[in-house]
Amino acid sequence: MTSTLDGPILSVSDVVALEKRIEASGTPLRELMNRAGRFVAEWIRSCVNESKPVLILCGTGNNGGDGWVIADYLSRWGYTVTLAATIPADELKTEPAASAARDAASKKYSPLSLIVHPSEEELAALIESAGLVVDAILGTGFNGISIKEPYASWIRLVNTHKQAHPDLVIVSVDVPSGLCAESGTAAKPSILADTTITMLAYKPGLLKEGNGKYCGDIVLARIESADG
């Protein structure tokens, strides 16, 4: 877990307020999402070569939108990328995730392998073949004690495979799915990430004692400016 903090610690509500200030100053939330996704994609490119297939697990909210952006960038850069989602891009409602997903799904120069509502067997096979899994399922808005299906099964499959194959790399976007970014309470199940790349500021729940087993190393993405 990160021992030296190189940025602010903000509550979830304070991060939302910061995003609104950034938007008011002229940076649309869609651009902020693009910066977040690109930051994660560049981090992956710095650590994992193109021979490693990447599996991206996306929820239906803006955390999932980050996942679509990550998939777009990585596939452009030559990675073999599979994105798993519960609904297709054109059925997403939350913005800017819906726009990001439709944009990524439509680009002919960055073909993605998309699988919608995979069975447990299909997802297990994808995890088995992946060198890296991106967790973009649940974001900072999650605050519960249990995970709904199919996400609970997705998380259990990833964690189980990681136990058997420690070389699998798991990267969580903003917060490990199942962990409350505010309180640090972990639902059952919660992703056990190797690295969590969190946006704009550290959230208090990530830093709670004992949560290193969920977060792994914490990387702060300072995406409020274009040069990150």
Image (cartoon, rainbow, N blue to C red):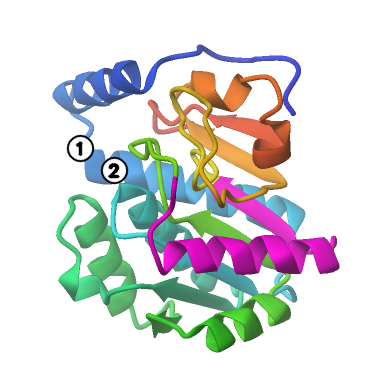
Instruction: Report the number of numbered marks.
Output: 2
Q: Secondary structure at mark 1?
A: loop
Q: Quadrant of residue 78?
A: bottom right
Judged left or right of residue 151, residue 47 is right
Towards the viewer: 113 or 28: 113
Q: Specify the amino acid type for callout 2.
A: Glu
| Number of other residues with Cα within 10 Å of mark 1, as a class: few under 14, some 14 to 19, many 20 or more | some
Q: Residue at x 17, y 72 (%)?
A: 91
Instruction: Examine the structure image and report whether residue 186 is included in the region drawn in magenta.
Output: no
Residue of label 2: 31
Residue of label 1: 28
Q: Residue at x 19, y 28 (%)?
A: 23
Q: Residue at x 37, y 56 (%)?
A: 64
Towards the viewer: 31 or 1: 1
Judged left or right of residue 64, residue 181 is right
Asked if residue 74 shows in the view, the reply is: no
Q: Secondary structure at mark 2?
A: helix
- The picture places residue 213, in percent across and down from the top left corner, at 73, 38
Tell me which segment is drawn in magenta: 146-172
